[in-house]
């Protein structure tokens, strides 16, 4: 068969795999149209008061998500999952239960937390050099072998968190603690979207 009559091979278009978020046994979820929020546990209702994850998005100070695990809530978490790739313009967290001054002081507050993204650099989003929970020396602050872009991206995150008073954990670029000694103060941290330079 002459070369000019051979069928041409067209490469298949690239595909993006979206893996499902791991489901935590006992978690409770609430949908809000374009996103879903899931909490690892929820305190049982008391009278007509409920403590589910929907309370985090109702713009009310007299409601809250309250974890329902035994103990101090260490390891409890909430996850926000968007139905499509979404630009986040800001995040504001109000730490503690603000229904009353008395309840604020009687209940615990977050002292340490991780901020994680389920997106990968392959999808055109921020490249930090490793995924979160990569317990490899490349995850450490000041790790060797990172590109200049990865170093810059980590620096932007570190600077923003430090400006808000958080302290980094030196072996996990994504992990920050709020200084010990919380005397019952309320914390409200706003995070705004910033365009990263090319």
Image (cartoon, rainbow, N blue to C red):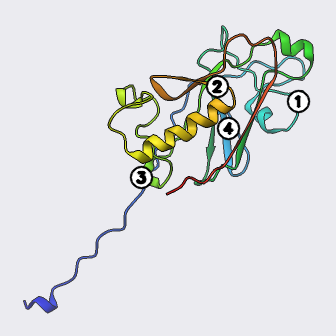
Local SS, label 1: loop
- Give the labeled residue for mark 1: 61
Instruction: Identify the residue at image location x=43%, y=37%.
Output: 131
Mark 2 and mark 4 residues within 8 Å of each other at the beta carbon: no
Q: Earlier in the sequence, mark 1 or mark 4?
A: 4
- Give the labeled residue for mark 3: 122
Instruction: Identify the residue at image location x=79%, y=21%.
Output: 96
The location of residue 151, given as percent across then percent down, is: 44, 40
Instruction: Identify the residue at image location x=56%, y=52%.
Output: 196
Of circles 2 and 1, which is in front? 2
User: How far separated are the C-alphas under marks 3 and 2?
Assistant: 29 Å
User: How far separated are the C-alphas under marks 1 and 4?
Assistant: 18 Å
Label 4 neighbour load within 10 Å: few <14, some 14-19, many 20+: some
Q: Which disc number belongs to residue 37?
A: 4
* 76 relative to 30 in the view: left or right: left
* 20 relative to 59 in the view: left or right: left
Local SS, label 4: strand
Mark 3 and mark 1 residues within 8 Å of each other at the beta carbon: no
The location of residue 90, given as percent across then percent down, is: 71, 45
Q: Which of marks 3 and 2 is nearer the N terminus?
A: 3
Q: Which disc number belongs to residue 166?
A: 2
Of circles 3 and 2, which is in front? 2
In this figure, what is the number of numbered marks? 4
* 108 over 117 or under it: above or below: above
């Amino acid at each position: 068969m002459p070369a000019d009559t051979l069928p041409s091979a067209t490469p298949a278009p690239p595909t993006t795999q979206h893996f499902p978020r791991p489901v935590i046994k006992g978690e409770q979820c609430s949908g809000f149209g374009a996103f879903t929020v899931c909490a690892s546990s929820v305190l049982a209702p008391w009278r007509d008061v409920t403590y589910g994850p929907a309370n985090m998005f109702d713009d009310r100070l007299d409601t809250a998500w309250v974890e329902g695990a035994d103990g101090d809530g260490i390891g409890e978490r909430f996850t926000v999952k968007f139905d499509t790739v979404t630009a986040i313009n800001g995040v504001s967290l109000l730490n503690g239960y603000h229904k009353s001054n008395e309840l604020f002081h009687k209940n615990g507050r977050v002292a340490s937390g991780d901020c994680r993204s389920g997106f990968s650099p392959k999808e055109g989003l921020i490249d930090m050099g490793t995924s979160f929970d990569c317990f490899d020396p490349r995850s450490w602050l000041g790790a060797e072998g990172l590109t200049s872009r990865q170093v810059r991206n980590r620096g932007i995150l570190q600077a923003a968190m430090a400006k808000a008073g958080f302290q980094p954990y030196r072996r996990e670029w994504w992990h920050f603690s709020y200084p010990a000694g919380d005397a019952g103060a309320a914390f409200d941290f706003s995070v705004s979207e910033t365009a990263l330079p090319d």
